[in-house]
Amino acid sequence: MRQIFGKLTKELNKHTNSKDVGKDIGFPIKSYRDLVEQVAKLSYLNKDHLLFFRGQKNDYKNKADKSTFYPTIYRGDHLTQEELDYRFDKLNSASKILVELFRKHKVDGITEFRRKKLIQWSVLQHYEVTETPLIDITQSLRVACSFAQYQNEQESAYIYVFGLPYYSNRISNNSEHDLVNIRLLSITPPQALRPYFQEGFLIGTEDITNEYEYKGELDLNNRLIAKFEITNNDDFWGKDFDRIPENALYPKNDKIENICNEIESKIQIELAPMNIGNFLKTWTTLENSLIKRSRKYIRETHRLRDALYILMKYEENLASLYKQIDSLRMFRNKVVHKPLSVENGELTYQINILNQVNEQIKKAHNTV
């Protein structure tokens, strides 16, 4: 996402500058009314941007000592490509399970939900099912403050102000700023209560998943305009305002929350302790090598099923091995298309078989 530097109020300019907002300590605020007034001034000064907020108990810093706001899927100082691939495999698996459960429970809007990954990811992120490339923010300052103080035993909390492009659709893609902004109120089904009370939005970097050139472009601190440190007590709200209670932030009888809780347990059964990402990665390597080998006999071969048929015909001495791979191919399809039906014991067994077959194929091809 493109970096911006916001315009600050007179009070904030005495405390920091637009380039060091993330590095400096938060501007101290003692009351909600004072915070509202500061934000109103910021909104006036930054007319080119729409202001959004995020509340946190702690001010998390990166190695450069700046406040950092990575989506959960990109968090970690030493995030390897293997770990990132695993997280996206887990996300894709959770998405498929979610679609199946939405269909099973007859949730409204299943046709659109099945087609749009961003909507699936939004639900998974907002209900904290698994890591996603999206991060939660809100347009409600009261919601942000309530979250910052929620289950917070420290003396203070933090409110962050971000400047984002004006949105015009439920899912707004801004190619100039490399941002996608998702309005939860507009894309989640009516059975989802939490987004309605939290006035939630989700932000991500456009067109980037598990491959990127520079990780820093995924950090929402690129859009940080101001940082406030508020007091964590009832006096902060004064007589005229009050924090949002827990039963409003996390309303009971939320049908989508119940479905998401079911997903979490199924992901654990499906993935732990083995990694579906490793299975699919090993499978893809094997698949590509077999298709390439089959082209020695018939050049126009593009599908694994055809490649196996060709190899069984021309390499009869390895036919039994190729038949075993065909059985693994059917399991691979099950993993991809019906993850809900895969149990961890079966996955563990098939991974061991795949590794053994892969080694046998390598040895056989080196001697043929």
Image (cartoon, helix red, strand yellow):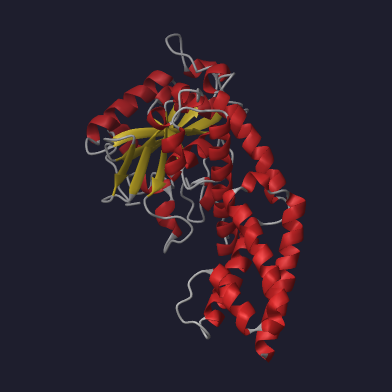
The reply to whether residue 224 is in sight is no
Q: Nearer the viewer, residue 253 or 332?
A: 332
Residue 186 against residue 235 in the figure, above or below: below
Q: Nearer the viewer, residue 309 or 261?
A: 309
Taking the view exactly as shown, the residue that stands out farthest to the top is 239
The reply to whether residue 81 is in sight is yes
Number of marks drawn = 0
Quadrant in the rendering for residue 364: bottom right
Taking the view exactly as shown, the residue that stands out farthest to the bottom is 367
Q: Give the quadrant of the C terminus.
A: bottom right
Please provide percent x and percent y for residue 340. 64, 44
Q: Nearer the viewer, residue 181 or 358?
A: 358
Quadrant in the rendering for residue 10: top left
Q: Is residue 277 left or right of residue 15?
A: right
Q: Nearer the viewer, residue 303 or 31?
A: 303
Residue 41 against residue 299 in the figure, above or below: above
Please provide percent x and percent y for residue 142. 43, 22
Please provide percent x and percent y for residue 286. 61, 72
Residue 243 against residue 352 in the figure, above or below: above
Query: Which residue does the image show at 56% across and 22% down from the upper left?
Result: 254
Please provide percent x and percent y for residue 301. 48, 75
Residue 320 against residue 253 in the figure, above or below: below
Query: Which residue does the image show at 28% across and 40% down from the upper left?
Result: 165
Q: Is residue 90 left or right of residue 196?
A: right
